[in-house]
Amino acid sequence: MSHPRLEEVKAFLLALQDDICAQLEAADGQGKFVEDAWQRPGGGGGRTRVLAAGAVIEQGGVNFSHVFGDKMPASATAHRPELEGRSFHALGVSLVIHPKNPHVPTSHANVRFFFAEKKGEEPVWWFGGGFDLTPFYPVLDDVKHWHQVAKELSLPFGEDVYPRFKTWCDDYFYLKHRGETRGVGGLFFDDLNQWDFDTCFAYMQAVGKGYCQAYVPIISRRKDTPTTEAERQFQLYRRGRYVEFNLVWDRGTLFGLQTGGRTESILMSMPPLARWEYSYQPEPGSREAELQDYLRPREWLAE
């Protein structure tokens, strides 16, 4: 048994994966996504699509997965004890894009649906997702555009939605061991079932469609910016923070690994190259030093 709308959600997610891949290929102008379909031994599978060595995108992945099983993993029951002993379906599209030019920000997006049931008890379902931006040489106009898209797609669902999910994003993508946000935020929401199903599904769709609307114009503006080897080295150093977040704090990575998901697809979010440097300090007053001012929660649309 599964949720009566499960196939409808799945059809949207598969079409969304196709649409995002097409828009990113057009923005890159050269690279093509290569698909790797996979099956999960415990139930389900997915389509992993990776674009490598493009004109703009050094490496990026756009993944669809639908996994199901009779028992929830420990990471999920620790977060939601009421899921103990339930069968589940988890499906979504998740993507991370690592451009080569340090002036084009890294971006991440995810939209997902979760459903769990147990005989004799009410089914549990929710939607989740969001998108966030990680620049290395940030431009305020780009950050404001990103957040403007997030605000506008949220407004039909209530004036409080963008502020709440923007704050949730700032809080979630926070590297506690570094005392900084992963980037300049965006939207993050989970456990969304407070509205009726149709409204929750509509919001998830709006976020999924809004990602390219927010990101593609930034690619166009920054992809031809001249760059130096020193800027490239700074980009690789800052990519290390991305790795740290995904391996130390990200709930989705943990859930995927604990449910027996496909490791290559789960770790697709890792950058192709990164570096760590002991006790790095940027030159005072430099563009590298300026980044730190962006790595804290700010009301971007009020600036």
Image: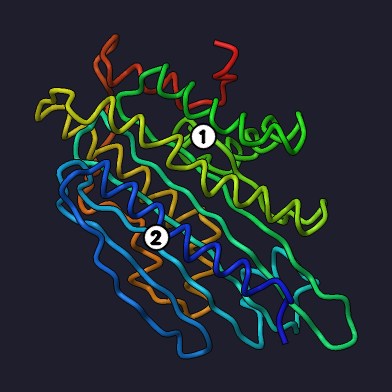
Q: Position of residue 85 (x, y in %)?
A: 75, 84
Secondary-structure class at tag 2? helix
Residue at image coords 69%, 29%: 163
Res. 18 mark: 2
Residue at image coords 57%, 17%: 301
Q: Position of residue 251 (x, y in %)?
A: 55, 59
Q: CA distance from mark 1 to mark 2?
A: 25 Å
Which label's residue is closer to the chain start, 1 or 2?
Answer: 2
Residue at image coords 33%, 53%: 22
| Picture quarter with the C terminus | top right
Q: Residue furthest left?
A: 229
User: What residue is shown with label 1?
Assistant: 185
Mark 1 vs mark 2, foreground winner is: 2
**Amino acid type, callout 2:** Asp
Whether 265 is drawn above or below 39: the answer is above
Q: Position of residue 30 (x, y in %)?
A: 15, 48
Q: Residue furthest right?
A: 120
**Amino acid type, callout 1:** Gly
Whether 3 is drawn above or below 179: the answer is below
| Picture quarter with the N terminus | bottom right
Q: Mark 1 touching mark 2, by CB under 8 A? A: no
Residue 261 lies left or right of residue 236; in this view the side is: right
Res. 240 mark: none
Residue 105 or 9: which is nearer the viewer?
9
Residue at image coords 90%, 86%: 120
Residue 209 lies left or right of residue 78; in this view the side is: left
